[in-house]
Amino acid sequence: DAAEAGRPAALTGPRAGGADDLKRIDGVGPKLEELMHSLWLFHFDQIAAWTPEEVSWADQHLVRFKGRVSRDSWVDQAKILAAVGETEFSKRSSK
Protein backbone atom coordinates (compact mmCIF):
# COMPACT_ATOMS: atom_id res chain seq x y z
CA ASP A 1 0.00 0.00 0.00
CA ALA A 2 1.51 3.34 -1.09
CA ALA A 3 0.19 5.21 1.98
CA GLU A 4 2.06 2.80 4.26
CA ALA A 5 5.33 2.76 2.28
CA GLY A 6 8.01 4.21 4.53
CA ARG A 7 5.82 4.14 7.65
CA PRO A 8 7.95 3.90 10.80
CA ALA A 9 7.78 0.70 12.81
CA ALA A 10 4.99 0.94 15.34
CA LEU A 11 4.20 -0.80 18.60
CA THR A 12 0.77 -2.01 19.68
CA GLY A 13 1.19 0.04 22.86
CA PRO A 14 3.85 1.50 25.12
CA ARG A 15 6.37 -0.87 26.66
CA ALA A 16 6.30 -1.78 30.34
CA GLY A 17 6.96 1.35 32.33
CA GLY A 18 4.83 3.46 30.00
CA ALA A 19 5.47 5.78 27.10
CA ASP A 20 8.38 8.21 27.05
CA ASP A 21 7.49 11.87 27.50
CA LEU A 22 7.72 12.79 23.82
CA LYS A 23 7.10 16.43 24.74
CA ARG A 24 10.79 16.51 25.77
CA ILE A 25 11.53 16.68 22.02
CA ASP A 26 11.68 20.30 20.87
CA GLY A 27 8.65 20.89 18.66
CA VAL A 28 6.38 18.31 20.32
CA GLY A 29 3.53 19.59 22.45
CA PRO A 30 0.55 17.80 24.01
CA LYS A 31 -1.52 17.65 20.79
CA LEU A 32 1.36 16.32 18.71
CA GLU A 33 2.27 13.77 21.38
CA GLU A 34 -1.36 12.58 21.35
CA LEU A 35 -1.25 12.27 17.56
CA MET A 36 2.00 10.29 17.75
CA HIS A 37 0.46 7.92 20.29
CA SER A 38 -2.48 7.40 17.91
CA LEU A 39 0.11 6.29 15.32
CA TRP A 40 1.57 3.82 17.87
CA LEU A 41 4.73 5.87 18.46
CA PHE A 42 5.63 5.96 22.15
CA HIS A 43 9.39 5.87 22.68
CA PHE A 44 12.51 7.90 21.92
CA ASP A 45 14.31 4.85 20.56
CA GLN A 46 11.55 4.34 17.97
CA ILE A 47 12.13 7.85 16.60
CA ALA A 48 15.93 7.58 16.98
CA ALA A 49 15.92 4.59 14.62
CA TRP A 50 13.99 6.28 11.81
CA THR A 51 15.49 6.13 8.34
CA PRO A 52 15.27 9.11 5.95
CA GLU A 53 12.28 7.38 4.28
CA GLU A 54 10.51 7.07 7.65
CA VAL A 55 11.25 10.72 8.48
CA SER A 56 9.69 11.67 5.15
CA TRP A 57 6.61 9.56 5.91
CA ALA A 58 6.22 11.18 9.34
CA ASP A 59 6.75 14.67 7.89
CA GLN A 60 3.86 14.02 5.48
CA HIS A 61 1.47 12.17 7.84
CA LEU A 62 1.59 14.21 11.03
CA VAL A 63 -1.44 16.24 10.04
CA ARG A 64 -1.15 19.97 10.86
CA PHE A 65 2.52 19.40 11.75
CA LYS A 66 3.95 18.62 8.30
CA GLY A 67 7.71 19.05 8.08
CA ARG A 68 8.16 19.31 11.85
CA VAL A 69 10.21 16.09 12.12
CA SER A 70 12.91 17.36 9.76
CA ARG A 71 12.74 21.00 10.76
CA ASP A 72 13.24 20.24 14.47
CA SER A 73 15.72 17.35 13.99
CA TRP A 74 13.63 14.86 15.96
CA VAL A 75 15.82 11.87 15.11
CA ASP A 76 18.93 13.57 16.49
CA GLN A 77 17.08 14.74 19.60
CA ALA A 78 15.56 11.28 20.15
CA LYS A 79 18.98 9.63 19.87
CA ILE A 80 20.28 11.85 22.66
CA LEU A 81 17.19 11.38 24.82
CA ALA A 82 17.27 7.59 24.36
CA ALA A 83 20.99 7.38 25.19
CA VAL A 84 21.62 10.15 27.69
CA GLY A 85 18.18 11.20 28.85
CA GLU A 86 18.58 14.96 28.32
CA THR A 87 18.97 17.52 25.55
CA GLU A 88 19.44 21.25 26.06
CA PHE A 89 15.73 21.70 25.23
CA SER A 90 14.55 18.99 27.64
CA LYS A 91 16.67 20.50 30.45
CA ARG A 92 15.08 23.92 29.87
CA SER A 93 11.54 22.58 29.43
CA SER A 94 11.58 20.52 32.64
CA LYS A 95 12.23 23.58 34.80
Image: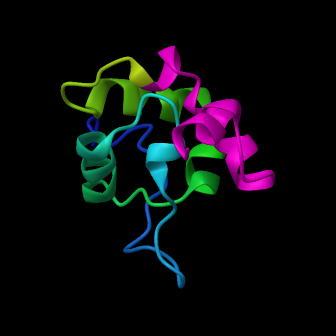
Query: Residue 6 versus residue 92: which sits nearer the camera?
Result: 92
In the image, residue 85 sits, relative to residue 66, either above or below, namely: below
In the image, residue 60 sits, relative to residue 2, either above or below, namely: above
Q: Is residue 92 magenta?
A: yes
Query: Residue 25 versus residue 60: which sits nearer the camera?
Result: 25
Which percent across, then down, holds residue 89? 61, 32
Q: Residue at x 52, y 39 (%)?
A: 93
Which corner quadrant holds the N terminus?
top left
Q: Seen in the image, is 83 located left or right of residue 26?
A: right
Q: Is residue 68 visible?
A: yes
Which percent across, then down, holds residue 17? 54, 82
Q: Is residue 42 magenta?
A: no
Q: Residue at x 28, y 46 (%)?
A: 30
Q: Residue at x 65, y 35 (%)?
A: 77
Which corner quadrant holds the C terminus?
top right
Question: Splitting the image into 4 quarters, where does residue 50 fall?
Answer: top right
Query: Residue 93 versus residue 77: which sits nearer the camera?
Result: 93
What residue range appears in magenta?
A: 69-95
Which percent across, then down, holds residue 14? 44, 73
Q: How many marks?
A: 0
Which percent across, then down, holds residue 85? 72, 53
Q: Is residue 50 visible?
A: no
- Residue situated furthest front in the rendering: 95
Q: Seen in the image, is 26 located left or right of residue 31?
A: right
| SS assignment for the magenta stretch, majority | helix
Q: Coloring scheme of the render?
A: rainbow
